[in-house]
Image: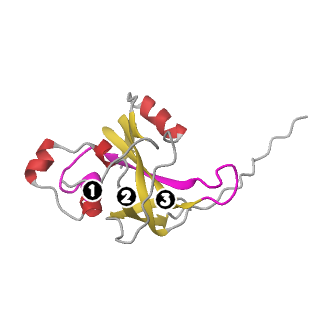
Amino acid sequence: MVMAKAEQIDREETPIGLQNAICAFSVDLGIQESTYEGEKTKKHEVLLCWELEEKMTKGKFQGKPFMVSKRYNVSLGKKANLSLALEGWFAREFTPEQREIGFDTDQLVGTQCTLTLTKTPKGSVKVTAIAPMQKNATKLEIVNEEPPKWAIELAEKGGATEYCGGASAKSDQIPF
């Protein structure tokens, strides 16, 4: 007889609160289907992934930075979450002309910020706000070469096959 049991995973908790971070990846997720208030919708999404300054202290990822991510609809509408996040990150609003032209999220890779991380009722960590990098923050470098495997698989499911980022990506603070 073979007995199946739940696998015990010794996983560190991602730190919450204000965290210095660097945008490590911008992953085009393509068209993703979701359900909102009982209605199915299809929207173009992007996933932004950040590496935190704080490093893991145990397990197979010891010494690697914690990584967090957030999915956004690809929209620069005044009330769109991506637009609000970018305006918080760079502490200025998009002009109507900039909203019309659009914004390439690949430009964010290599750019530092301060993230506010909170716990959800289910215990996972989510990005709730993005602010400019603190003046005295340590200069961070991207460590990981590729986004998480699950992000690449989600992008492929949405019909997208490209991402920008990794340890070889470089960027300065970008104005818009």
Name the residue carrying label 3: 52
Which numbered disc, 1 or 2, marks the residue that appears first in the sequence? 1
Q: Residue at x 55, y 55 (%)?
A: 65
Q: Is residue 94 left or right of residue 130?
A: left
Task: Please name the amino acid that badge 1 sits on.
Answer: Leu
Task: Please name the amino acid that badge 3 sits on.
Answer: Leu
Q: Residue at x 52, y 42 (%)?
A: 148
Q: Secondary structure at mark 2?
A: strand
Q: Secondary structure at mark 3?
A: strand
Q: Which residues are magenta?
A: 56-84
Q: Quadrant of residue 92?
A: bottom left
Q: Quadrant of residue 116?
A: bottom left
Res. 112 mark: 2
Name the residue carrying label 1: 86
Q: Residue at x 71, y 55 (%)?
A: 10
Classify 10 Å Cα crowding around label 1: few (below 14), some (14-19), many (20 and above). many
Classify 10 Å Cα crowding around label 3: few (below 14), some (14-19), many (20 and above). many
In the displayed structure, 159 sits above or below 128; it is above
Q: Position of residue 82 (x, y in %)?
A: 28, 52
Q: Quadrant of residue 90?
A: bottom left
